[in-house]
Image (cartoon, rainbow, N blue to C red):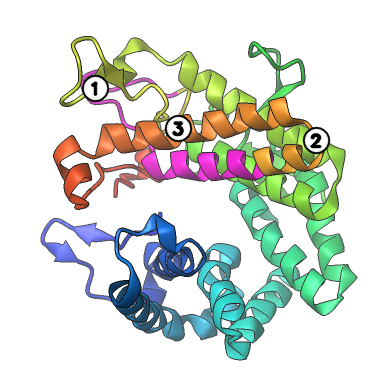
Amino acid sequence: MGAPVRRRRGPVPAPAHRFLDLRVFPGTIYSLLERSIRYPQSFQSHGAELATIRDSLEALGRTWSDPLHGQARRHDIHDLGFMIQPHMRARWELYHDTEAFETVKVAAENLVDMDENFVVIVDSMCNMDLLYYIAAHTGRQEIANVATTHSKKLLATHLRKESRTRPGYDGTLYSTCHVVNFGPDGQIKGRYSAQGYDVSSTWSRGQAWAILGYAQSYLWTKDPKFLDAARGLAEYYTLRMEEAPAEVEVPRKGGKEGETVGRYVPLWDFDAPIEDPSNPVRDTSGAMVAANGMLVLSQALAGLGLHSESARYLEDALRIAQDVVDLSVSPERRASGRGRRKPGVYGHRGSGQV
């Protein structure tokens, strides 16, 4: 996620607020802008050339971001954390843009008030960072309490304990259910999957959202239950990639004989049958969400002085990110800086290839 939606004959000529992918795209622009400001050494350009890049990114970011202020007031969609925080928070932190901060605050307040919808998806864990952030900046503890209550609830309703183990980790492993339907009394009416293969399978992107969400919730609360959840989710995610069929490995382009890539680029659903062994359907964007979650998890463990455990998740995160690049971008394009990734999916059942 984060790239413009494309059709066969070109980009979708619709306003940014009409499509989720287009609404989250500004966050990608502001991530690049933040990187150019905080880590200029990561860019090949320097001096006046880098300043020009920054100016261009800021102008482009505002072009995409400005039309989305009103989206924070929507009551018909739960994805406010994805839609608002990545770019509006960056505008506040990089430029002290008070209008952007107000939009982030409105999104958090609106999200807290959405109590009429009893269908809860595991993706919602990535909205908790929005709530904790605004609670910390406004002193409104009741908003943080909502985030903590929600995170605890999903431990019991969306996480499934697995009997499997992964070498080097002796805690509980968790898979995830995508959707839970609650009744007005808070009791579960049913479970199902909207974008995974079926209710009992593990949609890999949903698992990735959970890794990131619980790692973030731990950083804000220091609740060890959230840390254990994030670790168990990350371990299961990596285990399923390690145990995937041999078809996920393909010869490395331009590599030595016998070299392969793709082992750590997850299948779209860990339990779905592979329809075409010559081209398994994967989720490259979901892989990067999981890698991000593992980086946050590594940071959390380092803060506890658990450096060997921290290194474990850092290594897993970098392994995933590198494999995505190696699988998706040819050596020629990497060398020229003109990389373009292969398609990934957000929901294969619904023909959600992007």
- Where disc 1 sits, the SS reads loop
Per the model, the C-alpha gap separating discs 2 and 1 is 45 Å
Query: For residue 248, which quarter of the picture?
Result: top left
Q: Which label lies toward us, 2 or 1?
A: 2
- Tell me the kind of residue under disc 2: Gly
- Amino acid on which the number 3 mark rests in the picture: Ile
Other residues around mark 1 within 10 Å, as few (<14) / some (14–19) / many (≥20): few
Whether 160 is drawn above or below 251: the answer is: below
| Residues drawn in magenta | 272-297
Image spot of residue 79 (x, y percent): 56, 63
Toward the left, the furthest residue is 9
Of the residues under marks 2 and 3, which one precedes in the sequence?
2
* Above or below for 175 versus 99: above
Give residue 305's mark: 2
- Taking the spot 45% from the left edge, 38% from the top edge, the residue there is 287
Q: Is residue 269 left or right of residue 81?
A: left
How many C-alpha atoms fall within 10 Å of the one at disc 2: few (<14), some, or many (≥20)? few
Q: Nearer the viewer, residue 95 or 205?
A: 95
> Where residue 247 sits: x, y (%)?
30, 15
How far apart, in angstroms, are the residues tagged by discs 2 and 3?
24 Å
Q: Tell me the quarter of the picture where residue 252 sits.
A: top left
Q: Can the viewer see residue 26 in this picture?
A: yes
Tell me whether circle 2 and circle 1 mark residues in contact (CB < 8 Å).
Answer: no
Residue 94's x, y, as percent? Answer: 56, 77
| Mark found first going from the N terminus, 3 or 1 | 1
Q: Amino acid at mark 1?
A: Asp
- Label 1, on which residue? 276
Secondary structure at numbered mark 2:
loop
Q: Secondary structure at mark 3?
A: helix
Q: Which mark is residue 179?
A: none
